[in-house]
């Protein structure tokens, strides 16, 4: 406890210093970019940075349109121990001669973009140019889900997890293994490893099937922790008697170590320093996967969002000591799969997804917005004749076959509850509509001088997130 308080205090002091940088106290904005795996974080950051360096496609970012941003350039990041976001490689992938999507990244990384800003208009003559540093931090949304573990004991977490997965066929193997394991037996490392491996296999399969509630987050993205004891546990029902050295006790100890050594440092060292946050959501992907995936995404969003309502988590509020994220953007990504006539419906679904979490408790004063965006537009729009009428489609090059195709994903309902309602009631399939998603390859680009890669509403996203600081 005392350790926690001391840590909280020193962090509070440091956070005041960390909003400024360098000898002249240049302002720093720390922008967190998160989302579940494959949500589009890497593409978002790459395109955002490219479009801040070359701003011709950013008319809705006021400071870009009115010329206040004079230059934008990359600088060494301030945190020596964080991997650098590999901007150059990702940009080369996306904008090369045969463009391709960047590789999956799976860990935290950071990039500093510095913007030289000269105020325009009335105050132009009063203030000289200044530099604003934008520190962009890319981290997996799965890590935020782990916050829910902090206020739980191994016993509680086990009970909840086992209950949640009891009816999932994907979990059958793990549940069978857990049922035949004697948790009172003395720890036998191969048994512990087999349990952890089986539970991890379930988590991966669930993730593949579109489920979002796949914690502990590091089981999916272990990095250099793979195989270590902190990742070698699994949910087990608590036996009535527990001898010394029992398997269950050791699992409990590892669960606590996971919280202490893995979850806590992330929140303390990284999460707590974020000023602005964008949460990317592949809503179309979940809709395509079906009602259960949509419901599961809604639950995961609620969990993710609880990290931004620290009042609901005693441990986190103590760590943050009143510091909070000022703005949070919830963005449905890959909107270029839809003709723009459908974008308002996607945005409405996004709004409804977060509304639930929002109405129950506010975000401690943080300003929030929902948008539909595409960080890198891979399609063009078209209207084609169809059964005597017309159909609004998008055209692009299919990732699977390399062929060009016109694509109509199905009409999203005007009322988001027509999707979220059936999802919540546990319906197995969509009855009203049929939604599909295709994967498109990024298009070869010919950029004019000053132009960044094509996107949809990335400029509006940037205006919301950092416009007021430029
Ligand atoms: N059409 C389209 N597809 C996109 C867009 N952004 C991302 N994608 C697709 O989504 C995939 C994942 O994007 P990433 O940016 O790598 O996602 P991520 O969140 O960084 O994924 P991890 O690093 O695995 O967590 C890409 O490979 C593309 O297929 C977009 O703006 N338009
Ligand atoms: Mg990534």
Image (tube, helix red, strand yellow):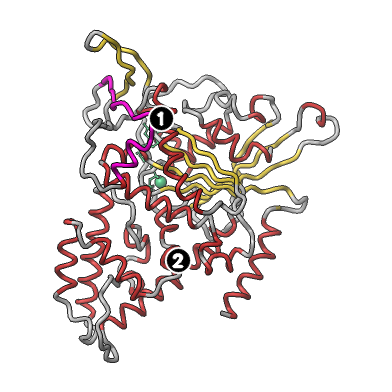
Q: In the image, is residue 406 part of the stretch drawn in magenta?
A: yes
Q: SS for tag 1?
A: helix
The residue sitting at 38% across, 35% down in the picture is: 416
* Position of 76 relative to 97 (above/below): below
Decide if residue 387 is on the left or right side of residue 307: left
The residue sitting at 52% across, 27% down in the picture is: 452
Placement of the N terminus among the 4 image quadrants: bottom right
Q: Along the polypeptide, which appears first: circle 2 or circle 1?
A: 2
The residue sitting at 37% across, 64% down in the picture is: 224
- The span shown in magenta is 404-423
Furthest-top residue in view? Answer: 388
Decide if residue 279 is on the left or right side of residue 382: right
Residue 456 percent coordinates (x, y): 47, 28
Decide if residue 387 is on the left or right side of residue 122: left
Residue 345's disc is 1
- Ligand 1 under 8 Å from disc 1 Cβ: no
Decide if residue 453 is on the left or right side of residue 158: right
* Position of 153 relative to 90 (above/below): below
Instruction: Report crowding for label 1: few under 14, some 14 to 19, many 20 or more residues within 10 A (C-alpha).
Output: some
Q: SS for tag 2?
A: helix
Residue 88's disc is none
Number of numbered discs overlaid on the protein picture: 2
Q: In the image, which is nearer the foreground, mark 2 or mark 1? A: 1
Placement of the C terminus among the 4 image quadrants: top right
The residue sitting at 46% across, 48% down in the picture is: 34
Q: In the image, is residue 89 part of the stretch drawn in magenta?
A: no
Instruction: Report crowding for label 2: few under 14, some 14 to 19, many 20 or more residues within 10 A (C-alpha).
Output: many
Query: Which image quadrant for residue 374?
Result: top left
The residue beneath circle 2 is 263
* Position of 28 relative to 371 (above/below): below
């Amino acid at each position: 406890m005392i350790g926690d308080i001391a840590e909280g205090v020193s962090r509070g002091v440091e956070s005041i210093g960390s909003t400024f940088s360098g000898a002249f106290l240049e302002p720093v904005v720390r922008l967190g970019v998160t989302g579940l795996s494959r949500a589009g974080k890497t593409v978002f950051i790459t395109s955002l940075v490219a479009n801040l360096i070359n701003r011709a496609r950013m008319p809705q970012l006021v400071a870009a349109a009115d010329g206040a941003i004079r230059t934008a350039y990359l600088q060494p990041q301030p945190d020596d121990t964080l991997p650098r976001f590999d901007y150059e490689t990702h940009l080369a992938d996306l904008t090369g001669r045969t463009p391709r999507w960047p590789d999956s990244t799976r860990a935290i990384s950071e990039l500093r973009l510095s913007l030289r800003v000269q105020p325009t208009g009335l105050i132009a003559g009063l203030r000289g140019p200044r530099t604003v540093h934008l520190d962009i931090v890319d981290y997996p949304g799965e890590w935020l889900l782990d916050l829910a573990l902090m206020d739980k004991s191994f016993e509680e977490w086990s009970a909840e997890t086992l209950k949640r997965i009891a009816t999932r066929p994907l979990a059958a193997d793990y549940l069978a293994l857990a049922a035949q394991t004697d948790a009172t037996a003395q720890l036998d490392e191969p048994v512990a490893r087999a349990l952890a491996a089986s539970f991890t296999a379930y988590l991966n399969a669930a993730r593949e099937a579109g489920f979002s509630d796949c914690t502990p987050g590091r089981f999916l993205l272990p990095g250099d922790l793979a195989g270590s004891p902190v990742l070698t546990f699994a949910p087990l029902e608590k036996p009535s008697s527990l001898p010394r050295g029992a398997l269950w006790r050791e699992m409990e100890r590892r669960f606590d170590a996971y919280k202490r050594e893995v979850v806590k440092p992330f929140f303390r060292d990284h999460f707590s320093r974020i000023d602005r946050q964008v949460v990317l959501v592949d809503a179309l992907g979940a809709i395509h996967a079906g009602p259960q995936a949509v419901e599961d995404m809604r639950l995961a969003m609620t969990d993710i969002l609880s990290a931004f309502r620290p009042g609901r988590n005693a441990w986190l509020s103590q760590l943050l000591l009143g510091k909070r994220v000022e703005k949070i953007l919830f963005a449905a990504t890959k909107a270029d799969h839809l003709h723009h006539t459908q974008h308002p419906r996607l945005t409405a679904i996004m709004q409804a997804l977060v509304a639930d979490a929002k109405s129950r408790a506010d975000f401690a004063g943080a300003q929030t917005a929902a948008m539909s965006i595409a960080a890198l537009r891979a399609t063009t729009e078209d209207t084609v004749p169809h059964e005597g009428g017309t159909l609004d489609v998008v055209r692009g090059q299919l990732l699977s076959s390399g062929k060009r195709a016109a694509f109509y994903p199905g009409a999203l309902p005007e009322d988001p509850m027509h999707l979220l309602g059936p999802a919540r009631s546990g319906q197995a399939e969509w009855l009203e509509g049929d939604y599909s998603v295709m994967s498109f390859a990024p298009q070869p680009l010919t950029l004019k001088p000053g132009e960044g890669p094509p996107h949809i509403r990335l400029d509006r996203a940037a205006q919301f997130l950092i416009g007021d600081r430029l």
